[in-house]
Amino acid sequence: GMGGIGKTTIAGAVFNQISSQFEGYCFSINVREESEKYGLVHIRDQVLSQLLEENLKIGTPVIPQYIQRRLQRKKVFIVLDDVW
């Protein structure tokens, strides 16, 4: 939708309301701009860092098995804002 009509504000309010129901959560804004600057692997690493609550810098397209195992049974909530 058009910029400036409150989509991010609504997404943030919903996120704040329900994120505590999940074992991991991530709210990423300006995804398009960040991915253009730093690449999708960087965005993915940021999301994984937030979900696992540690600073991860994987830097490769393939997610290591140990990270996959840590996430596979986790209930997570991810909001990516400004993606097109």
Image (cartoon, helix red, strand yellow):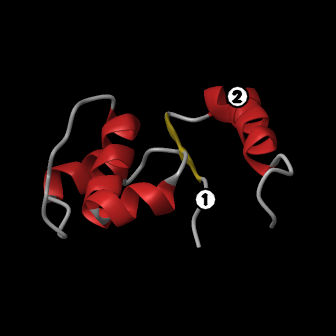
The relative height of residue 35 versus residue 69 in the rendered view (above or below) is: below
- Which residue is more in the foreground, 56 or 23? 56
| Image quarter hosting the N terminus | bottom right
Residue at (58, 35) in percent of width and height: 22
Circle number at residue 82: 1
The relative height of residue 56 versus residue 61 in the rendered view (above or below) is: above
Residue at (76, 28) in percent of width and height: 17
Few, some or many residues within 10 Å of mark 2 (<14, 14–19, 20+): few
Q: Position of residue 79 (x, y in %)?
A: 59, 50
The relative height of residue 60 versus residue 49 in the rendered view (above or below) is: below
Amino acid carrying mark 2 in the image = Asn
Identify the secondary structure beneath mark 1: loop
The total number of labels drawn is: 2
- Which residue is more in the foreground, 15 or 43? 43
The answer for how far apart the CA atoms under marks 1 and 2 are is 18 Å
Circle number at residue 35: none
Q: Residue furthest bottom?
A: 84
Residue at (35, 55) in percent of width and height: 43
Few, some or many residues within 10 Å of mark 1 (<14, 14–19, 20+): some
Identify the secondary structure beneath mark 2: helix
**Residue carrying label 2:** 16
Amino acid carrying mark 1 in the image = Asp
Q: Position of residue 23 (x, y in %)?
A: 50, 33
Q: Position of residue 5 (x, y in %)?
A: 86, 51
Classify residue 63 by image quadrant: bottom left
Residue at (33, 45) in percent of width and height: 46
Looking at marks 1 and 2 on the same chain, the residue that comes earlier in the sequence is marked by 2
Q: Position of residue 16 (x, y in %)?
A: 70, 28
| Image quarter hosting the C terminus | bottom right
The relative height of residue 13 versus residue 39 in the rendered view (above or below) is: above
